[in-house]
Image (cartoon, rainbow, N blue to C red):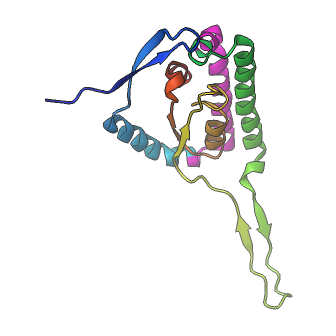
Amino acid sequence: MTPTASRFTTHDPATGAIIAEHAETSAAELSAAVAAAAAAAPVLAAATPDRLAVLLDAIAEGIEALGDALIELAARESGLDVARLTGERARTTNQLRLFARVVRDGGHLGVVIDHADASTVPPTPDLRRTVVPTGPVAVFGASNFPLAFGVAGGDTASAIAAGCPVVAKAHPANAGTSALLA
């Protein structure tokens, strides 16, 4: 007999009504997601700054394209009001675009070049330093900021800007919002 997937429900915090039933991620699905992120790591690490910036801008545009459906679902799952979530969506897309600008200007790389100086005792060698991607990053979504600190928020934006793929864990209180964002 094969085990059935574990399931959970999201609830409207104002009424207690069930919004939706969701399947828990299985161990096999998680392993596959981590393996896919590991496979994507060299691709993202080798991406040009412009390609990473284009990706970040596209994520922001995609979030905006979700329109009212995203805000309505997030409001229903979180109990937060529409005005608050509309502002949070703007914060999220602005973070993504900010990271795109930073990637384009290269400031995030922390490049330092110390030229050799044979006149010092001992002689100073030529030293060069830059920041490099570390590989896949895990992001854990928050319940109280389902957009800005959710699966597509600032933590995800900064990881992508650094050239790292992301495996995101949705908060169970806003699983539908997280799935829509993903």
For the point 70% across and 21% down, the residue is 89
Q: Residue 79's spot in the image, x, y percent?
A: 62, 15
Residue farthest to the left, as pictured:
1
Asked whether 91 or 113 is in front, the reply is 91
Q: Is residue 182 above or below residue 129?
A: above
Q: How many marks?
A: 0
Quarter of the image for residue 52 reads: top right
For the point 60% across and 9% down, the residue is 69
For the point 73% across and 72% down, the residue is 127
Is residue 54 highlighted in magenta?
Answer: yes
Q: Is residue 159 above or below residue 24?
A: below
- The answer to whether residue 50 is left or right of residue 33 is right
Residue farthest to the bottom, as pictured:
121
- The answer to whether residue 170 is left or right of residue 67 is left
Asked whether 38 or 11 is in front, the reply is 11
Which range of residues does the magenta coloring cover?
45-73
Q: Residue 147's spot in the image, x, y percent?
A: 64, 25
Quarter of the image for residue 80 reads: top right
For the point 68% across and 28% down, the residue is 57
Quarter of the image for residue 141 reads: top right
Q: Is residue 121 above or below residue 78?
A: below
Is residue 62 highlighted in magenta?
Answer: yes
Q: Residue 101's spot in the image, x, y percent?
A: 77, 37
Q: Residue 151's spot in the image, x, y percent?
A: 57, 31
Quadrant containing the N terminus is top left
